[in-house]
Image (cartoon, helix red, strand yellow):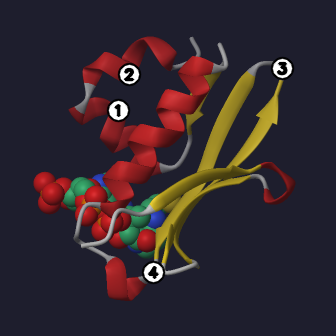
Amino acid sequence: MQEPEFSNNAAAHQYELKLDGGVAGYAVYEEQSGRVRFTHTVVEPQHEGKGLGSKLAKQALDDVRQRGLKAVPQCRFIAAYIERHPEYSDLVAG
Ligand SMILES: CC(C)(COP(=O)(O)OP(=O)(O)OC[C@H]1O[C@@H](n2cnc3c(N)ncnc32)[C@H](O)[C@@H]1OP(=O)(O)O)[C@@H](O)C(=O)NCCC(=O)NCCS
């Protein structure tokens, strides 16, 4: 599979993965007071089950870390990703 292109679409409040120029998956967030609250994650049905959601979660959380912010994983997919990858648990706002 072609490598998806990750970006933070700040105007739309979402992290995105693009394939062939189209958005294949996105993670919607609200950013406030140094916290990025992940509210909803979607991978387009034709791309589901191929690891795109996990790539998106990883790159979004890496961006949160790199910017010195905290994460609030309200979205259950992001919460489950952090449970499976405890190296991100220190990012979760207390
Ligand atoms: C949830 C979703 C984003 C996953 O995307 P994906 O690209 O298929 O995810 P991956 O292929 O990276 O799967 C990674 C793991 O996430 C797990 N997972 C799938 N859906 C999940 C969910 N709703 N909650 C928690 N974990 C989930 C899978 O079990 C998978 O683990 P496995 O590989 O051991 O089976 C996608 O299925 C989707 O858009 N669903 C509809 C919207 C939705 O329910 N969003 C989540 C709540 S906000």
Q: What residue type is disc 2 on?
A: Tyr
Q: Say which residue label 2 marks.
A: 88
Decide which of 81, 66 is in the foreground and name it: 66
Position of the N terminus by quadrant:
bottom left
> Which numbered disc flags the more N-terminal residue, 1 or 4?
4
In whole angstroms, how far apart are the C-alphas of marks 1 and 4?
21 Å
State whether label 2 is within 8 Å of ligand 1.
no
Label 4 SS? loop
Q: Say which residue label 1 marks.
A: 82
Binning the other alpha carbons within 10 Å of mark 2 as few (below 14), some (14 to 19) or many (20 upward) gives: some
Q: What residue type is disc 1 on?
A: Ile
Position of the C terminus by quadrant:
top right
In the image, taking residue 28 as reference, residue 62 lies left or right, namely left
Q: What residue type is disc 4 on?
A: Glu
Depicted 65 relative to depicted 80: above or below:
above
> Which numbered disc flags the more N-terminal residue, 4 or 3?
3
**Callout 1 touching callout 4 (CB < 8 Å):** no
Q: Say which residue label 4 marks.
A: 44
Binning the other alpha carbons within 10 Å of mark 4 as few (below 14), some (14 to 19) or many (20 upward) gives: few
> Which numbered disc flags the more N-terminal residue, 3 or 1?
3
Q: Quadrant of ligand 1?
A: bottom left
In whole angstroms, how far apart are the C-alphas of marks 3 and 2?
20 Å
> Which numbered disc flags the more N-terminal residue, 3 or 2?
3
